[in-house]
Image (cartoon, grey):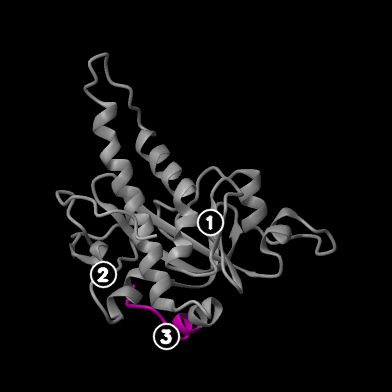
């Protein structure tokens, strides 16, 4: 991956207006990073308990999901007019012109989404009968749909995030366009975000993006950005 197409960046900026593009990217990525950090901080409490361990291989993901679900509405402090809707088994973020569906995509934007629930399929797949009003239409209420897949780990925090438009084909997203949020943040002006503090190292996917900076895990969490 050699960088974002400027036309796609402008498309995103136009869809987000009156929300500022860099503000949106900064606060959304910080919120996702905060979720990773908060969930990671809880994991030692699940281990080495005097009665035994009570963690499992989904504990981190469950805690991260609950953080996102329960704190999403706080984003409207930094992104005025944003409304968080806990529908479709995830957190849907609404601004004036778009509804943003954020979801974990560990295999990257081109990878398989794995098992897909009926609710997620209804949101991501094109509607077969335009005469029928589905749950997707009721939720979007005239807005365009933006997809925001992201990837992250317990040790690495948020490692990548993208946003764009596309539709579900089998278990993959067929993208019309998408941009990488870290590239937008790195090209912006202003103080560096904590999740852009130090290089991550090797890239994660075959279509390798530039090395993704992140906050070292040894730092203390500074609280949610929104």
Q: Residues within 10 Å of mark 3 (few under 14, many from 20)?
A: few
Q: Residues within 10 Å of mark 2 (few under 14, many from 20)?
A: some
Between disc 2 and disc 3, whose residue precedes?
3
Q: Is residue 3 magenta?
A: yes
- Residue at mark 3: 6
Whole-Å distance between the Cαs marked 2 and 3?
Answer: 17 Å
Judge whether residue 110 can be spotted in this image: no
Q: Earlier in the sequence, mark 2 or mark 1?
A: 1
Residues tagged 2 and 3 counted as in contact (Cβ below 8 A): no
Which SS class for mark 1? strand
When the figure is inspected, residue 144 is found, relative to residue 151, above or below; the finding is: below
Residue at x 45%, y 50% (from the top left corner): 71
Q: Viewer-nearest of labels 3 and 1? A: 3
Extent of the magenta region: 1-10
Q: Quadrant of residue 166?
A: bottom right
Q: Earlier in the sequence, mark 3 or mark 1?
A: 3
Instruction: Find numbered disc 2 in the image and state the secondary structure of the residue it sits on.
Output: loop
Work out how far the residue at label 3 is from the one at label 1, CA to CA, in angstroms.
25 Å
Residue 172's label in the rendered image is 1
Residue under pointer 2? 210
Q: Is residue 165 magenta?
A: no
Q: Quadrant of the N terminus?
A: bottom left
Mark 3 lies on a secondary structure that is: helix
Q: Position of residue 60 (x, y in %)?
A: 35, 38
Residue toward you, 85 or 167: 85
- Identity of the residue drawn at 26% across and 79% down: 190
Q: Is residue 217 left or right of residue 102?
A: left
């Amino acid at each position: 991956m050699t960088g974002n197409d400027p036309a796609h960046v402008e498309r995103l900026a136009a869809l987000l207006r009156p929300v500022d593009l860099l503000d949106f990217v900064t606060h959304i990525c910080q919120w996702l990073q905060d979720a990773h950090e908060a969930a990671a901080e809880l994991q030692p409490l699940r281990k080495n308990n005097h009665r035994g361990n009570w963690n499992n291989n989904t504990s981190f993901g469950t805690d991260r999901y609950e953080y996102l679900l329960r704190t999403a509405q706080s984003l409207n402090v930094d992104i005025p007019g944003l409304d968080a809707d806990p529908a479709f088994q995830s957190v849907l973020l609404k601004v004036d012109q778009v509804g943003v569906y954020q979801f974990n995509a560990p295999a990257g934007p081109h990878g398989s989404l794995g098992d897909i629930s009926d609710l997620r399929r209804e949101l991501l797949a094109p509607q077969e009968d335009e005469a029928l009003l589905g749950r997707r239409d009721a939720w979007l209420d005239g807005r365009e749909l933006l997809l925001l897949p992201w990837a992250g780990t317990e040790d690495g925090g948020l490692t990548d995030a993208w946003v764009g438009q596309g539709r579900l084909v089998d278990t993959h997203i067929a993208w019309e366009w998408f941009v990488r949020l870290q590239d937008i943040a790195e090209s912006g002006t202003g103080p560096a975000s904590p999740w852009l503090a130090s290089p991550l190292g090797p890239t994660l996917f075959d279509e390798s993006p530039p090395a993704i900076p992140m906050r070292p895990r040894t730092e203390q969490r500074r609280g949610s950005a929104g």
